[in-house]
Amino acid sequence: MPAFHDRPRFPRGFRCASRNVGLKPEAKDLTLFVSEVEANAAAVFTRNHFPGAPIILGRETIKGGRLRAIVANSKVSNVATGAAGVENARRMAAAAAKELDTDAGRVLVSSTGVIGVPLPIEKIERGVVGMAGELQDDPLVGAEGIMTTDSFPKAFSCSVGDATITWVAKGSGMIEPNMATMLAYIFTDAALDAPTLDRLLRSAVQRSFNMLSVDTDTSTSDTCAILANGLAGPVDETTFREALVAGCIKMTETLGRDGEGAEHLLRVTVRGALNDHEARRVAKSVLNSPLVKTMVHGADPNVGRLLMAVGKCFECTIKPASTDAWINGFQVVKGGERLSFDDDTVRQALKREVVDLEIALGVGDARAVAYGCDLTKGYIEENAAYYSS
Amino acid sequence: MPAFHDRPRFPRGFRCASRNVGLKPEAKDLTLFVSEVEANAAAVFTRNHFPGAPIILGRETIKGGRLRAIVANSKVSNVATGAAGVENARRMAAAAAKELDTDAGRVLVSSTGVIGVPLPIEKIERGVVGMAGELQDDPLVGAEGIMTTDSFPKAFSCSVGDATITWVAKGSGMIEPNMATMLAYIFTDAALDAPTLDRLLRSAVQRSFNMLSVDTDTSTSDTCAILANGLAGPVDETTFREALVAGCIKMTETLGRDGEGAEHLLRVTVRGALNDHEARRVAKSVLNSPLVKTMVHGADPNVGRLLMAVGKCFECTIKPASTDAWINGFQVVKGGERLSFDDDTVRQALKREVVDLEIALGVGDARAVAYGCDLTKGYIEENAAYYSS
């Protein structure tokens, strides 16, 4: 586990700026992340069949393996907007490129917000002018411009030898990424080529963002990109990989804890599964069960629901007689049967901000951890009027 | 579509009784359904890997293909209770059999309620004594004794030629049945043999209860059984099959509308899918999306969420350019793009008690309908303290 810095900072050569350009009434809604020199880059995107226009463009852009900047707006996601939407994404890349005196093919575009509403591209084109002069060193400023229902901006960093890695992301709702999370950007000054970045990113994402679910809904805009500008020179790849994974898991936990309406970070560890696929499947099933999530929310020691959620993985190898379960280290199920325990002890365990559920299946050696949150009235409130508010 | 009776009634020879035997403070908690002569019977049960003790026993009982009675309790589900639980289920069958002067192998047992709590079998054994003398003709009385969080008892009936079919069920939460719903009993005086009943039941369940989801959670107690005592003689099988399917769909809709916290019945029709499997998969994905469910709850015309929920069926054949969508008959998506429409029109459509979402995929001829409800603060409230309350 790397030591994360007390305050997030950028690697050498990276800076950012964010502004309100009129998409939201007052809050910041446009962010630029810039490397002073071209960086090697890799990215993974949503697998949703209705990818947003920025995803369609981004898949093309990332083929070059080189980026100078990321431009991202919140409030409108530019999804389900057809050919006009893709044209608007291109105009957004071009506007940022012009401001930064670079090529549009070196700018990754992201948009997040309501689906199916035309992107107010003129506001963005006008709004980006002059932002190059506002670039500064605090990653949280960039994180602010991409927030939707996030309750705080998300960024942190750590050192790897002489290099730095910085994570910036937003999450909150419509979050069960597959190949990437909503918007997560990773910046480093380590020298790594694009194919290496791609390999390291995919492997880290598999254990982190791809194990996150706030609400089982997979966004049409999920993007996770890594930029390495090389200004710190080469790093030890093993140390870098370990730091990358640890930071991606830390950001995954941060996104889970700040899921829409969430009051708890929920972590589900499954061990003793037949294989990795089944470990991940069971962990997600427990994590996503509304009855488990409301049990955590209400600190209600209704532990039979854990077995229900394990047992509904019909296609997995589950043996009741070898199934055990723990809540924050306190064993509640042994051999598929609920242990008799003091309700208050379990109630207290469920009241902690971080709730760890552990399931031992006893049928193999595979292990997986899934990340999410409880289900609250706050989630209903935010999502019953998201479009209209 | 058969004409359902204004008030539910039983087929010839069926009666029921229900009582409070002390499992709940005051409400009825034990029900007997009885046929005066042995009936041919078939049943389907949950596929959850942690089946309740009554399911383990029921799978054995139904092999005989003959039933005289069903005994069912609410409040405690007798799940995750090990060998002692199965023994208690046997004692429950024996107690009912003794009261009815029949064989324990002719009594189907069901239990519904909290998982992992020992069944108070002595209360049931004492409580069932004398119930044979209370048997009466109103199916709603039996429905009352099996309610958990249901807000009303569920029963209706229709005629098929000279015969009658009667449905009695309970639902509410932990409802995404697979092979059957929580507890649903179908009684008829038509003369049909057990293998025919089994075939007709499985086919009807596939299009009805198996397309129901309140919350994606699959109960450990799901049971759907049909009893045919033959007192009305033979019926036309086609007419019977159509009535059986129609009644199962009507009960499915009744359970959806009364899902925990529900304020709307939500129906999702998918047509133009590549095959039946994909039609069902996409319909369930839209039906189960928390963001679609909260959109319906808030009557918020955030229609892009429909595309998100279709698009997250990664393994299905989805072509954005051929995807259309309607809300209560009003088209909101054409060719994968959100149409521009008057928000208020869609808001009004979403406010109806029954909300029909229709998706045309344009890639084949398959069709499926899924049934469920909106997601409300009432669901959170009921489930954050179900065990403790």
Image (spheres, coloured by chain):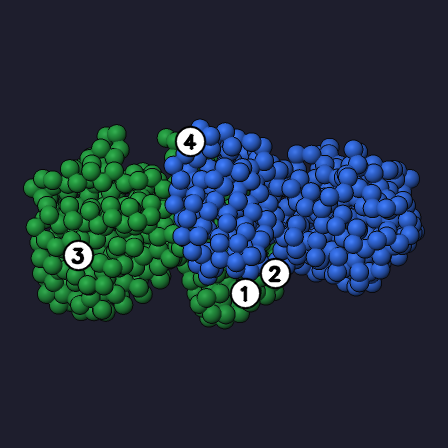
Chain colours: A blue, B green
How many residues crowd around disc 3 within 10 Å: few (fewer than 14), some, or many (20 or more)?
many
Instruction: Identify the subunit bearing mark 4.
Output: A
Say which label, 1 or 3, has the lower sequence index.
3
Name the residue beneath numbered marker 1: B316
Residue B328: percent from the left, percent from the top?
Answer: 45, 51
> Are the numbered discs 4 and 1 placed on the same chain, yes or no?
no
- Check disc 4 and report the residue beneath it: A343
What whole-number distance in Å separates the C-alpha atoms at marks 4 and 1? 44 Å
| Residue at x 71% of width, y 60% of height | A56
Dot 2 alpha-carbon crowd within 10 angstroms: few under 14, some 14 to 19, many 20 or more: many
Q: Is any atom of residue B266 visible in this view?
A: no
Instruction: Classify the position of the N terminus of chain B by image quarter.
Output: bottom left
Pointers 1 and 2 in contact (CB under 8 A)? yes
Badge 2 sits on which subunit?
Answer: A
Given this view, does label 4 or label 1 mark the residue nearer the observer? 4
Name the spot of residue B167 as percent of width and height, x first: 23, 52
Numbered disc in front, either 1 or 3: 3
Q: Secondary structure at mark 2?
A: loop
The chain ID associated with circle 3 is B
Mark 3 highlights which residue? Answer: B105
Left or right relative to A108: residue B179: left
Q: Which residue is mark 2?
A: A49
User: Residues under labels 2 and 4: Cα distance?
Assistant: 45 Å
